[in-house]
Image: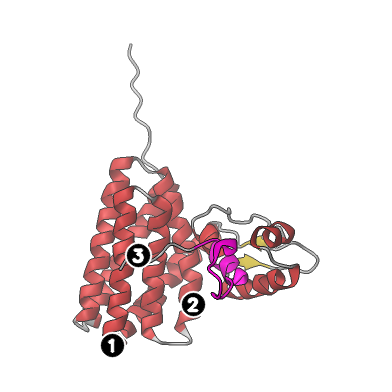
Amino acid sequence: MKPQPELPADDQPAGQPAPDRKAELAAALRRRILTMRIAPGAVLDEHELAAEFGLSRPPVRELMRQMAGEGYIELEPNRAARVTPMGHQSLRDFFLVAPMVYVATTRLAAERRTSVDIDVLAAIQDRFRTAIAKGDVEGRVFHNDRFHLAIGETARNAYLLPSLRRCLIDHARIAKVFYDDQPLARAESERDEAAAQHDAIIAALVARDADAAEALVRAHLDLSRRNMALYAAPEAMSLRFDT
């Protein structure tokens, strides 16, 4: 049976619970930040968000505090909330720390995964490949984030998961910058390589092969590193001067 599409709040059948507008706002904000529909450093307007999702300001402020703790936004006294910036230092910190966090979570996931965990990863990978087939850059970035978050949740480690969540924010934004900027042929090659790596990671988790899973996730991060290096220092233009 095909799942029924979500109905707007005003169209919910009688007797069904009303949608959780705060949860909807949280999901929307996270996706908009990860896919850079809201740019790094952008100010978030509480009034606009409250009006858009039919909320009063207190639950919006509460959500802002929660998302600040997760690393999506920054809060300062007497200033509006803003999306966490992304600059040279944050990118450097990401590439220094992310391999440790990703490797640890992936190795633990290989040891602790259940059949349900594998099913969740396979479903996310299906959505990732669907986004690729449709040329949906935003969907690809978002479902890549969900894939690695699901691995972190599979690891079941309360100390690693918050660090992974923070790394994934900039991982997603790095990917969005790269895919928006690159020529189609190169972007297609990179996305196919990333998808194949996802499939191989799932296979390694199924086999409970922590060493193979580690090698694959390192290669996956190296792909991101190469992409960002290419974006920051592109090949020089070739100019021809006729005499």
Say which amino acid is labelled 3: Leu
SS of the residue at dot 3? Answer: helix
Is residue 217 something one can see in this rendering? Answer: no
Which residues are drawn in magenta? 7-28
Q: Is residue 90 above or below residue 115?
A: above
Q: Position of residue 12 (x, y in %)?
A: 54, 66
Residue at 66%, 66% (x, y): give it: 74
Question: Mark 3 Cα within 10 Å, few/some/many (few <14, many 20+)?
Answer: some
Q: Which residue is mark 1?
A: 111
Q: Position of residue 166 (x, y in %)?
A: 51, 71
Question: Mark 1 Cα within 10 Å, few/some/many (few <14, many 20+)?
Answer: some
Rendered-image quadrant of the C terminus: top left
Q: Which residue is mark 3?
A: 221
Q: Position of residue 48 (x, y in %)?
A: 70, 56
Question: Any magenta on residue 10?
Answer: yes
Question: Mark 2 Cα within 10 Å, few/some/many (few <14, many 20+)?
Answer: some
- Viewer-nearest residue: 155 or 92: 155
Q: Does residue 184 appear left or right of residue 166 in this picture?
A: left
Q: Is disc 2 in contact with disc 1, using a CB cutoff of under 8 Å?
A: no
Q: Which residue is mark 2?
A: 163
